[in-house]
Image (cartoon, grey):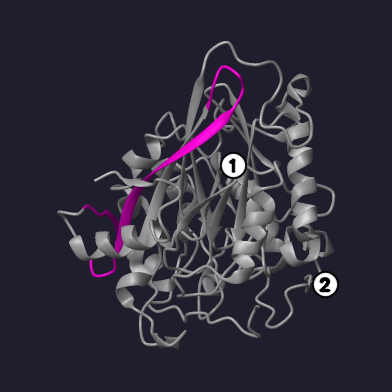
Amino acid sequence: MRPAHRIRFAAVGATALLLAACSAGTSDSRAGTLSSPASSRMAGPSSASASTTPAYGTRTTGPHPKAARSVTIAVSGDEIPHPAVLAAARRGIGWDFGPMFAQIAPVLRSADVAICQLETPLGASGVNLSHGFTMGAPAAFAVGLRRAGFDGCSTANNHSFDQGVAGLRETRRIMGATGLQAAGPAADASHPAQPAIYHAKGFTIAQLAYSYTLDNTVGDSSHVPAAAPWTAANLYDVVGVAGIEKDAQAARAQGADLVLVSMHWGEEQDPHPTTEQRRIARELLTSGTVDYIIGNHPHVVQPCERIDGRMVNYSFGNDLSDQFAGIVAYGGAVSTEAAQDGLIALVTFTRDTDGKITSTERLQPTRVDRANSHVIRLVSKASDPASWQRTTSVATAGGNSCGATPLH
């Protein structure tokens, strides 16, 4: 049962200034540049081959492969450009987010596809940058994500509409120019919002994204922004589980071998999945249409669970943020420590010679160093035993049915 309100954190830090040019510096060959198209392993829905269309609900696609294949997908926690994060990245009239992502970049690049949760509109400048409960990031934020190794992001969350329809449009434009795929609200009614399609290691991978709200409307999870009625397609309480399954079926009809669903759900600062999260996960993963659920929004790590052979990570915590303690929620004070813990999961899908798909998961705990320019640090049992224990114990709680193993 969902409460009537959600707790949100006020952002802290200095007020950021004008938008810098996106093109500062050069990008490496894997990330591409702002003017280059997406890499060859990514393509829009139209590029998927119809000849590989599976029957509804099956676990195979097209003819059985002659050899077993595996693909590894990296997924991470929320990317939130709080004012203090923007201030730490400020460089004269522009921004450089590269140092914040530098430590996690090798982990992201070790995967075949890397997906983030972008919890902000892009293209903001001046007074439209993040302030209070309103999020807004410069285009340089997308450049930082791409150069770190991300190939795409979910954009469906409670801050999607913080900059209105213009924000939806600019977010899509900037992500496309930067070489990032987007699964989430469309710029307008005439363009399909999703799925995002990735091609890697002989797999076609589709990503869908949904949220409990797009504009932080309190107490009405079926509210659709009046100026953007087409965004109803990204509200899971509007489309329902049946609607998500229908979208997943359509993605398979476009040739998807794997269907990933990003869900912005749950209660903030609570490490325990809600009854609603568990119900939706069970219905989706037993439907045969969805292979993996990527959970975000609680801002703390929640467990991984295997249901009917498929996995859900209920929450990855925060990858980058400036969240803090001092708010009482869910029976206790929110922990500064837990709010800065995060998790990157390396999920490997293997298709055997009979076409059956199985999955395994490796975990890389992370932590935002707020005192040192908000660098995202890799956490090991040796480097930060307290953070490592918090993250791994929660991620593997409930018997660790995912069989998830820490990298270090």
What SS does tag 2 mark? loop
Marker disc for residue 47: none
Q: State the residue position of label 2.
A: 226
Q: Can residue 25 be seen in this view?
A: no
The region drawn magenta spans 351-380
What SS does tag 1 mark? helix
Q: Which image quarter holds the N terminus?
A: bottom right
Q: Which of 184 and 356 is in front in this view?
A: 356
In-image side of 362 versus 54 (left or right)? left
Q: Nearer the viewer, residue 169 or 333?
A: 333
Position in image of residue 106 (x %, y %): 32, 39
Q: Is residue 378 magenta?
A: yes
Magenta segment, principal secondary structure? Answer: strand
Q: Is residue 32 magenta?
A: no
- State the image quarter where residue 15 is shown: bottom left
Report the amino acid beneath label 1: Ala
Marker disc for residue 177: 1
Foreground disc of the pair 1, 2? 2
Position in image of residue 118 (x %, y %): 54, 57
The residue positioned 69% from the left and 79% from the top of the image is: 217
The residue positioned 72% from the left and 62% from the top of the image is: 236
Report the amino acid beneath label 2: Ala
Position in image of residue 350 (x %, y %): 51, 28
Q: Residues within 10 Å of mark 1 (few under 14, many from 20)?
A: many
Q: CA gap, disc 1 to disc 2?
A: 28 Å
